[in-house]
Amino acid sequence: MEYKRQTINQQFRASVEKYGDREFLRYKSAGKWSSFSYKEVERNVRYLALALHDTGIRAGERVAIWSENRPEWNFADLAILALGAVDVPIYTTQSRGDIVYILTDAGATTIFVSPTFFADALEIKESVGCLSRVISFDCRSGEADGTRLFDLQRLIEIGEGIDKRDPELYERLSSQVAPGDLATQIYTSGTTGEPKGVMLTHVNLAANVIFSYRWTGLENHRDTALSYLPLSHIFERGAWYIFMYAGFTVAYAESIEAVPANLAEVRPTLMTSVPRMFEKMYAGMLARGMALPAPRKQIFLWAIKIARQWGELSNAGRRIGILLAIQHNIAGRLVYGKLREALGGRVRAFISGGAPLAPEIALVFAGAGITILQGYGLTETSPTISSNTETFNRIGTVGKVLDGVQVTIAPDGEILVKGDNVTRGYFNSPEKTHEAFTDDGWFRTGDIGFIDQDGYLSITDRKKDLMKTSGGKYVAPQKLESLIMSSRFVSQVVVVGNGRKFPAALVVPNFEMLKSYADLKGISCSDKTELVRDPRIVSLIERQIDKYTSDLSRYEKVKKIALLDRELTIAGGEMTPTMKPKRRFIEQKYESMINQMYVESQSQAALA
């Protein structure tokens, strides 16, 4: 595909020229929604960039951003890029140790922080010798312990004065940035080891914008997107650049907890998300449906069944019969319309990434008229490699490879990638950079997958996560987990068993659904711990797993389970900031429980 290599600065300038007074960023403050137009965002970015330059920030300098999603996050990002400096995003959920490591490794001289992290930033500065400037998104100015303190609004005022004195300075600075210049250094959360600083250039990010924009056909729409995933993650940030390029309105959710309310208020047409949100939406929907009085409950369950059938036939490209079409129309009026209205009533599609989504959930949502488009990518690929679209959508796959991106499958099944969207490597890690590429320049994704005869890419597992049983059989845990997550009684699952006789699973049940089941069966339990120990509950989960993995080979099937009485969380150390399980940590934390599953299996075999 032919295209002109650009910088994010050029794409931002083009968007401002094209969309001007159109609403760009919408945010809620003191209970009221307000917004910035494209021109207003440009003014803030221009003035901030000039003020940053005045404080001494120059091209190539590392500047960190530590904040929740808000317009100021993007003001800071675009201002840093306008100077040719390099931004270093920090997750709001990262540990103090990780933040100190990242700032030190990057050599960050400046950090933008929201009020939430201002005091922490001042403390962390004591451990990071290179850090000299702290810029707060609220009003903080002066000196403290040798740290230069600034507030964003004051800097914007300073920049406005500079712009009046030299109105061409901003254009001179931003136009000096070349497509091949480094734009951002994103430290991957990782499931093991210290974070790695992925270096992405302007052309990496800008190419992803062009490739994704053309492939998804966004030029035909004027959308509103609700943003809640962290901008520190390349998935949401890459999507934000695409929305900017396409002239969207981007509304910031107040928090993850406020997403349901914000959906109803903003009424978005598009939204990026991760499978965990859809899993919770599905579980919540089922819990509410099961709590309905008898006649309405039966109607709800019937509608879910019809949605599943409709989704399966549509996904397979098969004809929808007259009877099913009539039933689907009735279910739409009675149930599906209310579900869509709860999401604001205007959603064209959700874009899902970051982890596999259980096909069962995607099929039911599709049948209810809620489209979920799964895509695939990595931080190292800026991020998008492939994506389903509204025109080409096959549930169970991550779509077709984007025009402009090259993909090949290695003999061992690993997905290899080339293209302008691929990173130049890892900061301060020449050995890791060398290991990440083949001798002929293909980036090793670390994912195992295949491309079907119609060009759809499927991911089967992470190469490093593949388990080898003691019998020599390879098992893909992500594949198993995705199938098991189809059960409405399962909230989270981690499959274990490397070097063991068979796969086993740690399961966090959906406690809302379990409570309904327990009430129905007359099972009395005082708390979650007692509930997960009840043999009848364990048997239920075992039957569910058998049901959803019935088509697997015998050696792939889970033989033993252990139920956990609480969720796996980021705070608990079991999940990464992008909600991927830290397998090594989980296996260490629950080692005794895992060992007990295999001991019980040996005892049962001896008694047989």
Image (cartoon, helix red, strand yellow):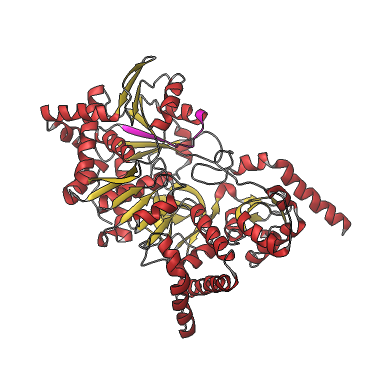
Residue 162 lies, in percent from the top left, at: 16, 27
141 or 93: nearer the viewer: 141
User: Residue 523: which quarter of the image?
Assistant: bottom right
459 in the magenta segment: no
Residue at position x 41%, y 55% in the image: 407
- Quarter of the picture holding the N terminus: bottom left
576 or 443: nearer the viewer: 576
Residue interval drawn in magenta: 86-96
Residue 591 lies, in percent from the top left, at: 71, 41
Residue 499 in sight from this viewpoint: no
- Quarter of the picture holding the C terminus: bottom right
Residue at position x 77%, y 57% in the image: 535
383 or 261: nearer the viewer: 261
* Residue found at the far right of this picture: 607
Residue 103 lies, in percent from the top left, at: 43, 27
Residue 171 in sight from this viewpoint: yes
The correct choice, above or below, for 190 with respect to 97 in the image is below
Residue at position x 57%, y 43% in the image: 569
Q: Would residue 322 appear left or right of 160 to someone viewing this image? A: right
Residue 200 lies, in percent from the top left, at: 36, 40
* Residue found at the far bottom of this picture: 322
Give the total number of marks visible in the rendering: 0
94 in the magenta segment: yes
* Residue found at the far top of this picture: 145
Q: Would residue 51 appear left or right of 376 to someone viewing this image? A: left
Q: Would residue 241 appear left or right of 369 to someone viewing this image? A: left
